[in-house]
């Protein structure tokens, strides 16, 4: 009887030690898996390109790791210093299979492009003199930021379309993408053609990014469906943008959380049959968004 008790005690203690050891060994992997599943933006169709606006060039590598962990394919990077630091950032992003575009934009360029042309000269010098380069230019030129937009709306929208046309015509060695609000539906006449302004943007630019800032899948789709239809019609890739910054509740996911945003984007992905992209504004506020 004593031997039986001793054997039982021995096996009980050994099993307990083994169980505790397994917990210690497997716990980090369990936590890592949970963290990855909880944090990652994984659309149902990963062929959908995922991008992010990056306005602050002083952010640490932690944000780049976050972008990579969340399936980001492209970064729209605002850094006109055009130094070795710029090239190094592009290098680190490229090593993670992330493409980097130069992000820039001032509404003043619509009426006076002198500063913009000077910026493009510096951009081209950077492209020629550094090993790691931008893929192209991402224009965030917003005519509605002009202080006289309400009284000169049609004129300024026409000037904006002319700015894009001249830019793309004069710099045919550079690819240009452009951000536009979802409501840019004013009919204008340009180059002897009359149609909605957003159609000219989609016609001229390499790719167009709609600031379809709503906090539900249905809302995002509803404000961008005309642009989606037109881009499909002419064979251009369109991106749908979502907001995570501090804006009105209907506009942003800031009052919700990452998990809710990812659910909405996956729902959106199920409802759109054509190729399109998703872009998140912007890396810092997205990073700081609560998980759930």
Image: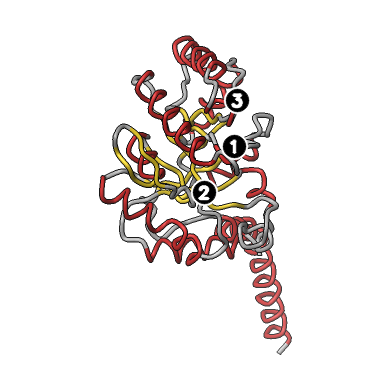
Q: Which mark is residue 173?
A: none
The residue under the point 44% across, 61% down is 221
Q: Position of residue 87 (x, y in %)?
A: 54, 20
Mark toward the start of the polypeptide (1 vs 2): 1
Number of numbered discs: 3
Q: CA distance from mark 3 to mark 1?
A: 9 Å
Q: Which residue is mark 3?
A: 79
Relative depth, front residue between 100 and 189: 189
- Indicate left or right for 142 with 137 as reference: right
Kindly indicate the quadrant of the structure image that contains residue 108: top right
Mark toward the start of the polypeptide (3 vs 2): 3
Q: Which mark is residue 211?
A: 2
The residue under the point 49% across, 40% down is 154
Q: Position of residue 200 (x, y in %)?
A: 36, 39
Element on which disc 3 rests = loop
Q: Where is the C terminus found, in terms of image quarters?
A: bottom right
User: Please, which residue is most extreme toward the bottom here?
Assistant: 1
Q: Is residue 173 above or below residue 19?
A: above
The residue under the point 60% across, 25% down is 79
Q: Would you call the spot at circle 2 few (<14 residues within 10 Å), some (14-19), or many (20 or more)?
A: many
Q: Which residue is mark 1?
A: 54
Q: Is residue 230 above or below residue 1?
A: above
Q: CA distance from mark 3 to mark 2?
A: 21 Å
Mark toward the start of the polypeptide (3 vs 1): 1
Relative depth, front residue between 31 and 185: 185
Q: Position of residue 89 (x, y in %)?
A: 57, 26
The residue under the point 36% across, 44% down is 199
Kindly indicate the quadrant of the structure image that contains residue 73: top left
Relative depth, front residue between 112 and 235: 112
Mark 3 vs mark 2, foreground winner is 2
């Amino acid at each position: 009887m004593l031997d039986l008790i001793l054997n039982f005690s021995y096996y009980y203690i050994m099993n307990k030690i083994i169980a505790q050891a397994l917990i210690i060994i497997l716990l980090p992997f369990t936590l890592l898996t949970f963290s990855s599943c909880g944090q990652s933006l994984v659309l149902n169709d990963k062929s959908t390109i995922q991008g992010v606006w990056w306005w602050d060039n002083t952010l640490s590598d932690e944000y780049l790791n976050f972008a990579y962990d969340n399936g980001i394919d492209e970064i729209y990077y605002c850094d006109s210093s055009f130094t070795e630091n710029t090239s190094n950032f592009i290098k680190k992003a490229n090593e993670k299979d992330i493409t980097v575009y130069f992000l820039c934009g001032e509404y003043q360029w619509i009426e006076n492009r002198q500063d913009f042309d000077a910026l493009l000269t510096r951009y081209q010098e950077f492209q020629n003199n550094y090993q790691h380069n931008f893929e192209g230019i991402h224009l965030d030129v917003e005519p509605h930021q002009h202080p006289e937009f309400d009284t000169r709306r049609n004129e300024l929208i026409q000037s904006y379309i002319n700015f894009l046309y001249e830019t793309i015509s004069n710099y045919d060695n550079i690819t240009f993408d452009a951000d536009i609000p979802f409501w840019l539906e004013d009919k204008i006449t340009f180059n002897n053609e009359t149609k909605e302004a957003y159609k000219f943007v989609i016609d001229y630019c390499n790719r167009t990014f709609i600031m379809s800032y709503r906090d539900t899948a249905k809302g995002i789709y509803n404000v961008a469906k005309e642009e989606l239809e037109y881009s499909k019609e002419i064979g251009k890739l369109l991106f749908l943008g979502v907001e995570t910054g501090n804006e009105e509740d209907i506009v942003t996911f800031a009052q919700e959380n990452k998990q809710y945003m990812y659910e909405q984007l996956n729902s959106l992905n199920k409802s759109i049959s054509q190729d399109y992209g998703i872009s998140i504004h912007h890396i810092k506020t997205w990073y700081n968004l609560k998980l759930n």
